[in-house]
Amino acid sequence: MMAREIPIKLAAHLARLLKRTRRRYRKRLARCQEHFSEAAVHELRVETRRALALLDLVMTLDLAGSPKKPRRALKKRLDAFDELRDAQVELILVAPWLKKFPGAAEFESFLRRREDDLVAELKCEIRKLKSRRVEKSLKTLEKEVDDARGTTSMSVAAVLEKPVRDAFNRVATLRKKIRRPDTKTIHCTRVAFKGYRYLCELLQPLLPEMTTGRLRRMHDWQTRMGDIQDAEVLLAQIERAVKSGDVRLASVKHLHAALARRLVVLVNQFISVADDLEFFRPKVIVTARKAGVS
């Protein structure tokens, strides 16, 4: 039995999203199993993140009884790709520096071997995955959410006010904690903002102010933080490779110094626009409050 009723328009939208998500996830997984390419992996990761954001919304609205189980399964599958994603991004980041620092080719070779090992390992793992169990869970949730269509007097804006407000406020709180010397504070803000952006994308048809242009600006703001994280991951990988003896210090010393300087630039650039977060404050909050929702 559903814990609450929600406006017909919202229930119908969420049910459609769940249906679309389970179908798209099935297709993305099948494509990745058939042709394990960088593009296929990326699309599967993106679709998985969207599914997680949708399940989080369903849980927040208290609309169904069992979103936690498929969420755990999807999160575990997403985490399995982390190392491969890092290796592929590291190769992209290193490429432009090779002409200036030819000695870094030794590090690039190390990254390619690492990528090959991870691909071989994940190919075997992903072929074992089945979409049936996740699909079944999502289909059950779809029916439960569809059954939540009610005669409630609350507007869509009023129902969405709390989850959207809370998601934004989490980001705003973390943004206030950002300190230039501590890039972990930027990373935490990025993770929270990514969740907020996915939520806004899911609800875009119900939030008139969330235009395509606005969502693109949100993506660009998030990317600035992502560039910082990628640079840090690459620097850490160089240090680990040297420590393990896979790469000689002399071959990457100058590259490491250049990347460290680049990291400082990226941090300074982001700090200069960090307060742009306020541009992304959801107007649905104001709408709901005018309707008398606390």
Image: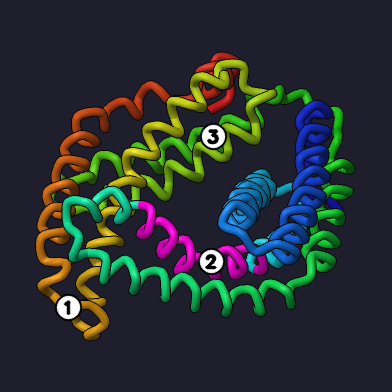
Q: Main secondary structure of the magenta part?
A: helix
Q: Which residues are magenta?
A: 73-92
Above/below status of 134 relative to 198: below
Where does residue 179 sit, x and y in percent of width and height?
A: 17, 46
Nearest to the observer: residue 197 or residue 157: 197
Near mark 2 (Cα within 10 A), the count class, few <14, some 14-19 or many ≥20, is: some
Where does residue 25 sit, x and y in percent of width and height?
A: 74, 53
Determine the secondary structure under disc 2.
loop
Q: How is the image coloured?
A: rainbow
Upstream in the sequence, badge 3 or badge 1?
A: 3
Upstream in the sequence, badge 3 or badge 2?
A: 2
Q: Is residue 60 visible?
A: no
In-image side of 113 versus 163 (left or right): left
The residue where tag 1 is placed is 248
Please state which of the two labelled residues, at mark 3 or mark 1, is closer to the viewer.
1
Q: Is residue 86 magenta?
A: yes
Query: Which residue corresponds to the image point at 57% horizontal and 79% vertical from the top-left?
Result: 121
Near mark 1 (Cα within 10 A), the count class, few <14, some 14-19 or many ≥20, is: some
In-image side of 168 versus 79 (left or right): left
Identified by mark 2, the residue type is Phe
Identified by mark 3, the residue type is Val
User: Which mark is on residue 83?
Assistant: none
| Cα–Cα gap, marks 3 and 1 | 49 Å
Q: Quadrant of residue 89?
A: bottom left
User: Which mark is on residue 164?
Assistant: 3
| Cα–Cα gap, marks 2 and 1 | 28 Å
Above/below status of 211 relative to 144: above
Q: Quadrant of residue 289?
A: top right
